[in-house]
Image (tube, rainbow, N blue to C red):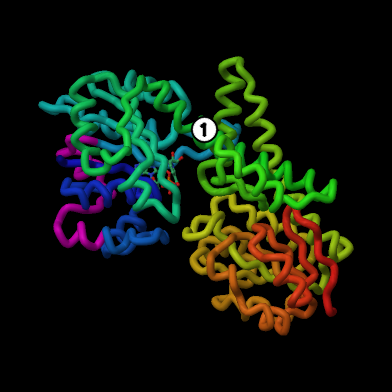
Amino acid sequence: MNITVVGTGYVGLVTGTCFANAGNRVTCLDIDAKKVETLERGDSPFFEPRLSELMTRSIQANRLTFTHDIETAYSDADVIFVCVGTPTGEDGRCDLANVFRVADDISTTRLGSATLPLVIIKSTVPVGTTNRIAEKLNEFVVANNPEFLREGNAIDDFKRPDRIICGVEDPDAIETLTKLYAPFVGQGRPLLFFDIRSSEMVKYASNAMLACKISFINEIASLCEKNGANIDNVRTGMCSDNRIGTQFFRPGIGYGGSCFPKDTLAVMEMGEESGAPCLVNTAVHALNQRQRTWFANRILKHFEDDLTGKKIAIWGLAFKPQTDDVRDAPSIDIANKLLAAGAEVTGFDPEAWETFQREVPEIVISMDMYAALDGADALVICTEWSEFSAPDFSRIQSLLKTPVIFDGRNIYSHSDMKKYGFYYYSVGRPTLEICHI
Ligand SMILES: NC(=O)c1ccc[n+]([C@@H]2O[C@H](COP(=O)([O-])OP(=O)(O)OC[C@H]3O[C@@H](n4cnc5c(N)ncnc54)[C@H](O)[C@@H]3O)[C@@H](O)[C@H]2O)c1
């Protein structure tokens, strides 16, 4: 099949590459000409494990091409996947300008063609949007097909999804989607066809549920701190109950990224607009924002609210491990708060140094995790990259001016921290104040 994928971000590029890998001829369109130049050279504009290798294979097999010309992209397409960004707008609502612009472009280039392409909205859009696009493109069949991949594990998630959801009622479109997704389903991985509105809602409801689990465990963690319990024990006890499960249930400095924060806000907005205010989601969002501020304030409090002349090192800048994405990362708010309080901030991240420096130009980026610590008054962990999990603690001790660790992801054990004599703060666990300063 001739597929055009619109938008070459984390979702579009992975979608295009995986469909090309499955034998389709895929054209990826982006309005960002610089991005297209990078892609044409065979490079990925962002870090995603295994993506470059799969891209190269499909480019060499002439199944994957890139363009920023809408005529080239749309003229031969049998199927168009719309994967453009749907960020939170200035008014707090989901900004749909990109998706509607794509609808206009498709209409301009294809209306009047002998056969019209199936248009599939993969971007996350508020309930009712796919139908609004269908009204605009009234000669075309328009379907909804939300994406559930996780950055950092995107290729595997796309190729082996827990489920694929399609919102479509047209029988030919159902047949096309069944053929397209045949290589990725089976073996207990269902391809589910729903009405369009339910399909749109599944995506928001799933992200809202996962965000809720994170804010919930963070709320319990703060109760643990106030009441002398240890969240590790509480979590282990809770997770032994199969109904609760273990995933997305780790205390820390909260969620970030391009999905949970904006999708939670979009759910709240949908609630307001439809007269069904979403009280749980409102609390989930507020708790998540509070968590970052609370953690930054904890650092400030340790230094008696004055960071003048202090140097703070941050390990982990990406919103989560295995990505260079820093959109709405807690590390941004934390670094900014430390800088505003007068600190010099150094940062290390295995992948997200360039993306972070663009957001926080005042940070001094170090290309070596230990060099970032040299002469620092404290180490702050914002992202749980595996390279931080078993470091050389003696080396950390000798590099830091004072052996203080603020662990925003609870990656270290109390026994290690005691053994090496760190002053150690984490989330929902007792603070260790014993150290050999
Ligand atoms: N990132 C994720 O992990 C993830 C997971 C599931 C769903 N989603 C959803 O998928 C959508 C895309 O997310 P993303 O993270 O890939 O976005 P992104 O911002 O990384 O990429 C979007 C791309 O679309 C391009 N674009 C914008 N308007 C265009 C137009 N008119 N024509 C062609 N290209 C255009 C941009 O230049 C950009 O390269 C969003 O709705 C998001 O909520 C994202």
The residue that appears at 39% across and 34% down in the rendered structure is 146
In the foreground, 41 or 410: 410
* Mark 1 Cα shell of 10 Å, populated few (<14), some (14-19), many (≥20): many
The residue that appears at 55% across and 24% down in the rendered structure is 270
On the rendered structure, is 105 left or right of 9? left
Q: Is residue 397 above or below residue 13?
A: below
Circle 1 — which element? loop
Q: Where in the figure is residue 315, as x and y percent of width and height? A: 62, 67
Task: Report if the beta carbon of the residue with label 1 is closer than 8 angstroms to ligand 1.
Answer: no
Q: Where in the figure is residue 49, as x and y percent of width and height? A: 39, 61
Q: What residue is pinned by disc 1?
A: 94
Q: Is residue 273 above or below residue 65?
A: above
Amino acid under label 1? Cys
Q: Which residues are magenta?
A: 55-79
Q: Quadrant of the N terminus?
A: top left
Q: Quadrant of the C terminus?
A: bottom right
The residue that appears at 22% across and 43% down in the rendered structure is 183
Is 17 magenta? The answer is: no
Q: Is residue 425 visible?
A: yes
